[in-house]
Image (cartoon, rainbow, N blue to C red):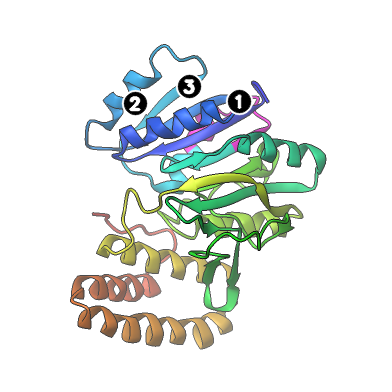
Amino acid sequence: MRCRSLAVVLNWKRGGMTCRCLESLAKGGWEGRVCVVDNGSADSSVEVIREYVEGREGIVLVELPENMGFAGAVNRAVKAAGHEAERVLIINNDAFVEDDAVRCLWKAMDDDPAIAVIGPKIMQPGEPPRIDSAGCRGIIQLAQPFMRGHGKADRGQYDHPEDVEYVTGACLMVRMDVFERVGGFDEDFFMYFEDWDFCRRVRQSGGRCVFLPSAVVTHIGSASTGDTTPFYHYHHARSRILFARKHLSASVFWCLFVPYMFFYRVIFQGIRMIVAGMPRNAAAILYGVLWHLGVRRDERPGLS
């Protein structure tokens, strides 16, 4: 594994958590290079990471001047530090590898050259053990993603490797030649849906996307953005529309996806949020839907 691999760890305003992630990689047997990419944090997290990295061989810190989103940060990290790497491990800074997880992922790709992307069983923290993701599937016509097993007790129901629609970007390993062949992550997705889009393009190019339960990662989830904020709901709606526009035919997009998105997400869920005392979340969804139904894919609105 040494010198033939690159681990990319994203940081945004969570320096201490990023260092915990780096510690878990070291304890979990990672022997390749590590690139920590700071996504334009405006706090002291860069100093925390810089102090941690100092004197540790094989770890580089890339500081971006602004928040480039998940896709932009990963692409720049791979470009900066991915030379000679055969495989790239992409892991969120709030994800922590268990035992021999990285070795399991590496060995599975060694054993089967057809595997292009592979992801571990991702667990939620705490007791009793609950699954965060056992690979992912989706209803493509509605651009509706599902994390298999999400929130369910782990009773061994997903303890067999299998091909899946996609694996979550919280932790995945990809062959470098595959990453380059499909052009990396699509930076039109500032956050959310970039992993589904990436794996879909990999599968369309002939590669397999595999879930490997013997590799286990614990994921805190929403450590940087939160999943109940207007920021989350705006970007989730925005990226969902971009994904649908990219992967659906015009007839399916306008006749099926748009009515579903408007009546279910905007009206039904919007009313529920208002009743629950979260009108700003409802407004964020409405803004994301209406704005991005009319905006071109190469236009990027201001971010807050």
- Residue at the spot of label 1: 83
- Residue at the spot of label 3: 59
Furthest residue toward top: 55
User: What x and y, as percent, mark residue 15?
Assistant: 32, 33
Query: Which amino acid does the dot numbered 3 rest on?
Result: Ile
User: What x and y, as percent, mark residue 289?
Assistant: 35, 74
Cα–Cα span, label 2 and label 1: 23 Å
Choose the circle earlier in sequence order: 2 or 1: 2
Report if the CB atoms under discs 2 and 1 are less than 8 Å apart.
Answer: no
Query: Which amino acid does the dot numbered 1 rest on?
Result: His
Q: Is residue 73 left or right of residue 165?
A: left
Which residue is painted at 62% across and 38% down in the image? 101
Whether residue 186 is visible here, answered yes or no, is: no
Q: In the rendered view of the protein, which quadrant contains the N terminus? A: top right
- Residue at the spot of label 2: 49
Q: Where are the magenta residues, as a range?
A: 76-88
